[in-house]
Image (cartoon, rainbow, N blue to C red):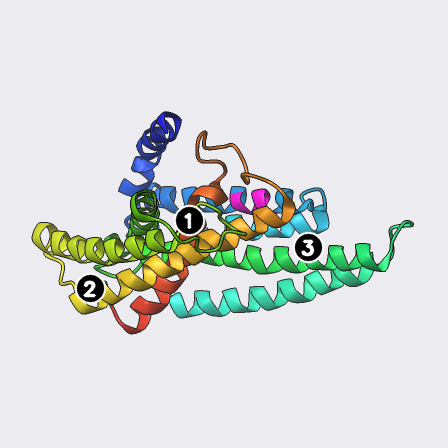
Amino acid sequence: MKTRIITALVAIAGIFPFFWFSEPVGLNNPLHYMFPLLISAIAFVSVFELLRCVGLDKNYFLAIPLYLAALAFPMLARVMYAAREDFIRVAILAVLVFAVYFFCILVFTYGKDPESTPEKEQLQTGKIALVFMTSVYIIGAYSAVILLRNVPKNGKFLYLIPFVFGWVTDTFAYFTGRLFGKHKLIPAVSPKKTVEGAIGGAVCCALVTILYGLLANVWFGAAPNYVVLAVSGLIIAVVSQIGDFAMSAIKRQYGIKDYGGILPGHGGLLDRFDSCMAVTIVLTLINTYFPLFA
């Protein structure tokens, strides 16, 4: 626990300047590129951790385009902050191009191994499909962080929500589970997590989300929609835990404890941001149709 706390404090101190200069105003101000550069770096490392987990990090025909996309799309979201719809069109086209490209990899590598068997080919196909699906998820989620930050007027409140409330859910679910947990939630994926912990995390997240809106109103004059905030808090809590379970399921499938060791006591970036990525995507969708702040 001590190592986890020290790592968290050092990480917060290290990334604070990037968040401080995250205001998406003025394309000619180089300081405002610090935040998307940080997010691009996190996306790059996350994709690397995924590829290493499934054993495809040495497949450079597959890895290099994914690394480039991880670096490019958060930055592209920043550059196109005034043309969000155009960015979304580019992102959709990129996903389709990657789908065709991955099919090409499948076709031209099928049966090339002299010791190939139908079982090995099926396993390789499954790995490539998993990498495609999860990489789109990772890169899309980190790009959505920039989209949230780019929201006029209220972006400074929105983009912190995936980080803050993903971790709020994890923290309260942990302590609630320790105190009251009796029924295992999904033991095959995460043996220690309980139904009681999940409920406690969801309820606390909804309450803290309302508190967040209240503080934003008192301190910064924001105009929160408390009903949307409360409902979003519950949804965030559920999605956060699903994101955690999803990335844990991949780890269990490939027999690893952590995706990496870049954050002592926490594991890799995928271990730390697994719940935040899922929340970012859902929050972007919610705020598009039901703004959390007027």
Residue 40 visible from this viewpoint: yes
**Three-letter residue code for mark 2:** Phe
How far apart are the two marked residues, 3 and 1, measured between alpha carbons? 27 Å
Determine whether the residue tagged by mark 3 lies in a helix, strand or loop.
helix
Decide whether the magenta segment is chiefly helix, strand or loop: helix
Residue 3 in picture, x, y percent from top left: 39, 26
Residue 20 lies in the magenta-colored region: no
Q: Which residue is mark 3?
A: 127
The reply to whether the magenta stretch includes residue 49 is: yes
Residue 80 in sight in this render: no
Alpha carbon separation for disc pair 2 and 3: 41 Å
Q: Secondary structure at mark 1?
A: loop
Residue at point 30% right, 51% down? 165
Q: In the rendered structure, which disc, 3 or 1, sits on the residue that comes first in sequence?
A: 3
Q: Residue at x 45, y 67 (%)?
A: 88
Residue placed most toward the observer, 278 or 242: 242
Image depth: mark 2 or mark 3 in front: 3
Residue shown at 36% from the left, 68% from the top = 285
* Residue type, numbered disc 1: Lys
Task: Give the class, few, some or many, for how many residues have Cα within 10 Å of label 3's Cα (few <14, many ≥20).
Answer: some
Q: Which residue is mark 2?
A: 293
Q: Which residue is under mark 1?
A: 193
Q: Earlier in the sequence, mark 1 or mark 2?
A: 1
Instruction: Specify whether 146 is left or right of 220.
Output: right
**Closer to us: mark 3 or mark 1?**
1
Going by the picture, which residue comes out furthest to the bottom? 289
Quadrant of the drawing holding the N terminus: top left
Callout 3 touching callout 1 (CB < 8 Å): no
Number of marks in picture: 3
Span of residues in magenta = 46-50
Q: CA distance from mark 1 to mark 2?
A: 33 Å
